């Protein structure tokens, strides 16, 4: 808004989009570690044995060329670009879940369903908001020319808005629970912990 004497002029500008340098990517890495013997190890123990599972995702960010290409297509527009970018992310997640012994496709579909039910916009912390953005699809109709995966993901998202439960998807895990921190366990009490090595040594002391 611009004021010139007694006259007020309303200023406006075209919608702008964020573009990143070509080759930019967003990476996310996680590590789940479970103690097997002596975790955490007291000073008398020779060491600890742990089992660790690491995974990582690299997600390509839209550059200036991609932005101009996606948003100038009047026939498909922004919803197609959103579904396409999310599909690339979901496919990488499915590979990770498959390697862990779960059905990656079923787990991603369950996550899309649960996110629509349990995570509200701007209702939680930053992690929940990022998670909601990743697993929320546009409500625009999927076009017949789009890949089949778009229809599957879109259907799971819409089921979450219509139904009260997402248990029909065959996945024992809940990534929404993981994002909300329900799987976090309190740290063990180091003072009262005794490793098997310490018990073995005391029996012959």
Image: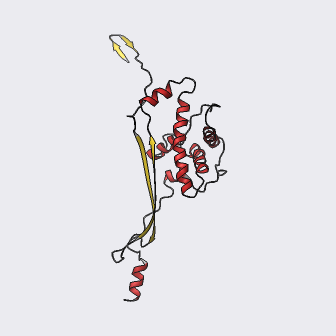
Q: Split into 4 quadrants, where in the image is the C terminus?
A: bottom left
- Locate residue 151 relative to residue 70 in the image: left or right: right
Q: Is residue 2 above or below residue 54?
A: above
Q: Residue furthest bottom?
A: 204
Q: Residue at x 44, y 21 (%)?
A: 14
Q: Nearer the viewer, residue 196 or 102?
A: 102
Q: Residue at x 42, y 46 (%)?
A: 27
Q: Residue at x 47, y 59 (%)?
A: 184
**Which colour scheme appears in the figure?**
secondary structure
Residue 114 position, x and y percent, is: 59, 47
Quarter of the image for residue 145 reads: top right
Q: Residue at x 53, y 40 (%)?
A: 86
Q: Nearer the viewer, residue 179 or 24?
A: 24
- Locate residue 77 relative to residue 164 in the image: left or right: left
Quarter of the image for residue 204 reads: bottom left
| Count of numbered circles in the view | 0
Residue 169 position, x and y percent, is: 64, 50
Q: Nearer the viewer, residue 194 or 32?
A: 32
Q: Residue furthest top?
A: 6
Q: Nearer the viewer, residue 117 or 44?
A: 44
Q: Is residue 145 above or below residue 175?
A: above
Residue 65 position, x and y percent, is: 43, 29
Residue 121 position, x and y percent, is: 51, 39
Q: Split into 4 quadrants, where in the image is the N terminus?
A: top left
Q: Is residue 119 above or below residue 22?
A: below
């Amino acid at each position: 808004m611009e004021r010139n004497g007694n006259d007020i002029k309303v200023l406006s500008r075209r919608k702008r989009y964020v573009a990143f340098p070509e080759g930019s990517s967003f990476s996310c890495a996680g590590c789940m570690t479970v103690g097997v013997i002596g975790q955490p190890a007291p000073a008398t123990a020779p060491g600890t044995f742990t089992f660790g599972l690491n995974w990582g995702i690299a997600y390509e960010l839209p550059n200036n060329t991609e932005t101009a290409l996606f948003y100038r297509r009047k026939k498909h527009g922004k919803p197609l670009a959103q579904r396409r970018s999310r599909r690339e992310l979901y496919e990488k997640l499915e590979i990770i879940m498959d390697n862990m012994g779960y059905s990656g496709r079923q787990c991603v579909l369950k996550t899309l369903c649960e996110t629509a039910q349990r995570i509200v916009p701007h209702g939680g912390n930053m992690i929940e908001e990022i998670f909601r953005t990743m697993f929320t699809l546009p409500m625009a109709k999927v076009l017949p020319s789009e890949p089949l995966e778009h229809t599957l993901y879109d259907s799971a998202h819409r089921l979450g808005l219509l139904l009260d439960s997402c248990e029909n998807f065959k996945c024992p895990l809940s990534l929404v629970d993981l994002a909300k921190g329900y799987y976090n366990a309190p740290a063990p009490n180091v003072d009262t912990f005794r490793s098997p090595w310490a018990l073995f040594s005391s029996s012959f002391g």
